């Protein structure tokens, strides 16, 4: 499981979701702000879903979007990553 955090963009996705918990992102929004290619983003999200760090919420209707949210475990890990990042920047 550790190797997933070594992959490009994984930590960035978790930190972005943590920073904006009140505004769940769609895949399109995450791709845009994370500056990852669509393929890379899809792979990272799939890995994060498989280990239950993120979940998708599917909207209803013709223009419904799929929102990406942290799970409780994902939130805990993202908070720890944020603390590590903060300590490294001091």
Image (spheres, rainbow, N blue to C red):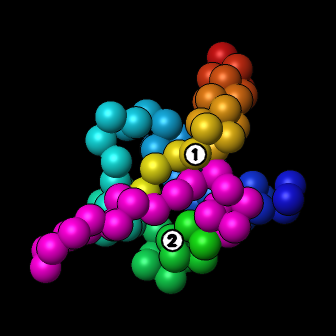
Identify the residue at horizontal 69%, vertical 67% (top origin). Answer: 50
Question: Exactly how many numbered labels are in the figure?
Answer: 2
Q: Is residue 28 above or below residue 88?
A: below
Provide the residue designation for mark 1. Answer: 71
Nearest the eye: 45 or 9 = 45
Which residue sits furthest left? 62
Nearest the eye: 64 or 19 = 64
Task: Please say whether residue 84 is visible from this viewpoint.
Answer: yes
The disc label shown at residue 41, or none: 2
Q: Position of residue 41 (x, y in %)?
A: 51, 71
- State which mark lies toward you, 2 or 1: 1
Which residue sits furthest front? 60
Q: Which residues are magenta?
A: 47-67
Quadrant of the image for the N terminus? bottom right
Q: Position of residue 87 (x, y in %)?
A: 70, 20
Identify the residue at horizontal 66%, vertical 17% (top origin). Answer: 90
């Amino acid at each position: 499981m550790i190797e997933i955090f070594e992959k490009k963009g994984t930590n960035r996705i978790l930190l972005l979701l943590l920073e904006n918990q009140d505004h769940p992102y769609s895949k399109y929004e995450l791709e845009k702000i994370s500056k990852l290619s669509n393929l890379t983003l899809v792979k990272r999200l799939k890995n994060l879903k498989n280990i239950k760090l993120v979940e998708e919420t599917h909207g209803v209707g013709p223009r419904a979007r799929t929102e990406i949210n942290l799970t409780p475990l994902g939130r805990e890990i993202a908070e720890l990553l944020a603390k590590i990042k903060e300590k490294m920047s001091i």
